[in-house]
Image (cartoon, rainbow, N blue to C red):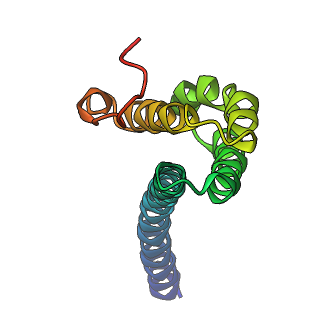
Amino acid sequence: MPRLVWYVLALLAAFALGALWQYVGARRGAAALGTAQSALAEARLEATLASAVIEVQGGNYEGGRQLASDFFTGLQRHVATAPPEAAALRPLYAQRDNVITVLSRNDPASAGLLSRALTDFRAAIRPGSGANVPAAPGAPGPR
């Protein structure tokens, strides 16, 4: 009988080790998934804002306004669910009303505002690289 107890204990220990192994792997996978989802959200936001810049530079202010609105809506959602490092994106969201208003007025200066917003967004998500992004012609210079 004692031999059977040892076999059961060995089986339980092997099961516990296997479960621990799977748990650690799942935690690593969950962390990697969260990082990938955040990076994907940032890439989509960047593409949306870049599209808005292109639309406005082509004279399509309404299309640019809609894309800018989509960008700011996505930015709000991203900042709410992103890690604390995303706090650098909050000041960018404060520009929303001004950008949308200027775009709705078909103001040519809106291309510069959007280009600056794109530069600021890139600098916030990739520190150190935002200063290397060329601004649109007529865009305000560095602050």
Q: Residue at x 68, y 44 (%)?
A: 72
134 lies left or right of 50 = left
Q: Residue at x 64, y 48 (%)?
A: 68
74 lies left or right of 54 = right
136 lies left or right of 93 = left
Q: Is residue 62 above or below residue 12?
A: above
Q: Position of residue 93 (x, y in %)?
A: 66, 32
Q: Position of residue 11 (x, y in %)?
A: 46, 82
Q: Is residue 9 above or below residue 79?
A: below
Q: Position of residue 16 (x, y in %)?
A: 50, 70
Which of the two residues, 18 or 38, is positioned nearer the viewer here? 38
Q: The C terminus appears in which quarter of the rendering?
A: top left
Q: Position of residue 95 (x, y in %)?
A: 66, 27
Indicate the quadrant where residue 129 lies.
Answer: top left
Q: Residue at x 47, y 36 (%)?
A: 121
91 lies left or right of 23 = right
Indicate the quadrant where residue 17 lies.
Answer: bottom left
Residue reaching furthest to the top: 143
Numbered disc total: 0
Which of the two residues, 50 or 106, is positioned nearer the viewer here? 106
Q: Is residue 100 above or below residue 57?
A: above
Which of the two residues, 59 or 111, is positioned nearer the viewer here? 59
